[in-house]
Image (cartoon, helix red, strand yellow):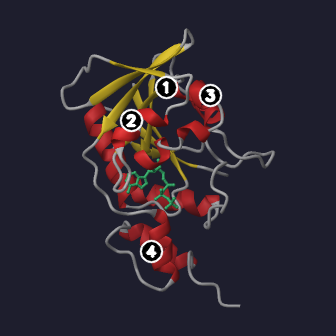
Amino acid sequence: MKIGFFGGSFDPPHRGHIALARLAMERLGLDRVLFAPVGIQPLKRDRAQAGYADRVAMTRLAIEHVPGFEVSPVDAPRADGRPNYTVDTLRSLRATLAHDDQIFFLMGADSFLGIDKWYRAADLLISCDFAVAARPGFDLGRLTGALPGAISVASCDAEQSDVLVLCLRSGSRGESRLYLLPDLDEEVSASSVRAMLHHGADAVRVLDPAVGGWIRKHGLYREKKD
Ligand code: ATP
């Protein structure tokens, strides 16, 4: 099976997340996409605003009508309270899959442009294939410049004509593929959604109605009045 792994804060899940996962599923022929809300994101100093259980519930509501989309607990908060490092998460995920399942790590261009700061980035980059989608304001053309020095890039033969693909290599340690999805154009972020909700605006254009309902019912992202 071809499995998409889509990690993130999903604080809250919005239209951009769904559009990215749909595009990757269609272009790469994925059988399943696993949305994995992260317990503690190592590089986001301002921790998630909604708790893990709310983010899981909202993500479930945002995807439940899409066949093949699922919520995965693989990146749940750790028992020891440490941040969730993606190399560890992928190792745990692989242990739950069949031997010949292929993992595609889905992300937006903004995340990939910071990949060299991730823990054990070179090991991560050859541990599975990657699918990186365009995001307004972030240049997909700069992706290869963002790779750690231990990774070299070569062209690969594309199996499909509508997907751009590069081969990533790390010496003799291995090889993976980097698929580029340039035709996503979703001008939305979770931080802009939170800012709207904080000031009492609704965000109906960018949130699933069921997610909006959960946020209202549980009073999330509202300005705290002491
Ligand atoms: P925040 O604004 O709080 O930083 P976010 O909107 O980037 O949040 P995350 O849950 O942190 O959402 O993102 C999870 C993944 O989804 C990341 O890889 C990110 O690049 C990608 N992503 C989120 N929104 C978009 C978008 N509008 N276009 C392309 N990729 C996106």
Mark 4–mark 1 distance (CA, rounded to whole Å)? 36 Å
- Badge nearest the viewer, 4 or 3: 3
Q: Residues within 10 Å of mark 1 (few under 14, many from 20)?
A: some
From the viewer's perspective, tell me whether residue 129 is left or right of residue 225: left
Q: Indicate left or right for 3 with 27 as reference.
A: right
Q: Amino acid at mark 2?
A: Ala
Q: Residue at x 27, y 30 (%)?
A: 164
Residue name at image x 56 percent, y 75 percent? 220
- Residue in front for this viewpoint, 150 or 62: 150
Residue tagged 1: 128
**Residue 131: mark:** 2
Q: In 3D space, how far apart are the residues under numbered discs 2 and 4 (Cα atoms)? A: 31 Å
- Circle 1: element type: loop
Which residue is labeled 3 in the image?
Answer: 91
Residue 219 sits above or below residue 153 on the image: below
Crowding at dot 4, Cα within 10 Å, few <14 / some 14-19 / many 20+, comes out as: some
Find disc 4 in the rendering and name its residue.
213
Q: Is residue 155 something one can see in this rendering?
A: yes
